[in-house]
Image: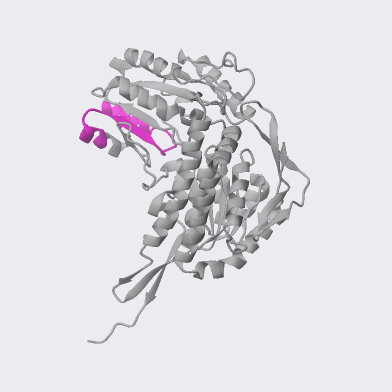
Amino acid sequence: MKAYTQHYINGQWVNAQSAAVFEVHDSTTEAVFATVPQGTRAEAEQAVLAARKAFESWSQLPVETRCAYIDKVVEGLKARTDEMAQTIAREVGMPIKLAKMIQVGGPVFNWGNAAKVARRFEWEKKVGHSLVVREPIGVVGCITPWNFPLNQITLKVAPALAAGCTVVLKPSEIAPLNALILAEIIHEAGFPPGVFNLVNGTGPEVGEVLASHPEVDMVSFTGSTRAGRRVGELAAQTIKRVALELGGKSASVILPDADLEAAVKGTVSACLLNSGQTCSAHTRMLVHVSQLDQAKPLARAAILKMTLGPSLEEGSRLGPLVSAAQRDRVQQLITQGLAEGAELVVGGPQTPEGLSQGYFVQPTALVVQRHHTLAREEIFGPVLVILAYANEDEAVAIANETVYGLGGGVWSQDEAHAMAVARRMRTGQVDINGAPFNGNAPFGGYKQSGNGRENGVYGFEEFLEYKAMQLKPSET
């Protein structure tokens, strides 16, 4: 077991002030395989002041100089890909093959893309007799989740640094090890002191300092809607900018003319990635009432092909959930759904056979009604709910009758028709016929799924302010 004892503040590894630690559990074995220190408010404030002190000089560096540091992070991540993938597979439960491709491959792309966007960005523009310039917003507090831990860190930290901001990061206490490895890479890249800081800690202790501190100009948060409300409340006291990426209950609308087998298979895949621990997962599958009886066995067959097993085994398609608490919550929700009258298609709340150790949940599909809890509440586990609709207007109504609006999908043999339905969905992104994720397209939500966007130039602009300098018009 590895015991980490330091935070990263002002360019140095600093011994923790408190002896209290977080235990990091291997999601497959349930064993504690590392500990990290629990940061204090004082350490969070120390990190904020270090970031404030570093901001002026970092923000004034040429863009190319900042991007050259980021290039070194890309190389560092590539060199430690195997170590990082194994760490995240153990922390989160994503199978190792997918962890290497998604949990590490995604961040490698996104660090590199942040530098690419910064180098190409139009930093100033003449508008009439004004020169409009873009400038970094300042000190950014980044509070990140456990489900895609390194990638959610990257989508905040990389563009913020490229934009000229300085950063204080509070990673998830459930999956913190990847962030410490990243801090080692950043340190080796030689960033100036105070530009990047990391303090492990709880939301109430460290996160609330970042959200409320007057020397923090912006807070970027990814997590639950409940915690996002708290961040917004605290940030409002100092009128700081807030970017929130919160929950989701995304609908995959299968229109009657779609290739039903392909649509069901694609929806199952979009639901079960990372064992359903994905905010934009397509967890509601909407099928025409006339096709419901055909869709159920297709869903069952697709789910049964998802091999459930230890995260470090190459043959696993689905791994465990992140924690005992998450496993118990998901199993309780499945039980509640059945008690409310849901029809079980496959899976169930019982512990999977042969996997009594580890935070495993059977991948499950249920047919539910619009008023059922599972049709409305984010489950964050390997659970697909199927709803029948009578006509297209009802399908759109079902898709939109949630407080969330993060992801979604539409399936149809007529792409123009699918896009017409997608335009009626109140959600931040819609996949047409299972189209792949685009790392340069804006990612974010409507309604209680948050505000602000990540990815590409859209995420980069979140960390910039506008300044207009009026020039005296020349006399003609």
Q: Residue at x 44, y 47 (%)?
A: 109
Residue farthest front in this picture: 79
Q: Nearer the viewer, residue 336 or 72?
A: 72
User: In the rendered structure, does residue 278 fall within the stretch colored magenta?
Assistant: no
Q: Quadrant of residue 265?
A: top left
Residue 416 painted magenta? yes
The quadrant of the image that shows the C terminus is bottom left
Residue under the point 37% across and 13% down: 297
Tell me if residue 309 comes above or below residue 118 in the rendering: above
Q: Is residue 164 above or below residue 329?
A: below
**Which residues are the magenta region?**
392-420
Q: Residue at x 32, y 35 (%)?
A: 435
Confirm whether residue 223 shows in the render: no
Vertical position of residue 191 compared to residue 377: above or below:
below
Q: Position of residue 34 (x, y in %)?
A: 69, 38
Quadrant occupied by the N terminus: top right
Q: Is residue 307 left or right of residue 133?
A: right
Percent x, y of residue 260:
29, 20
Q: Is residue 129 above or below residue 474?
A: above
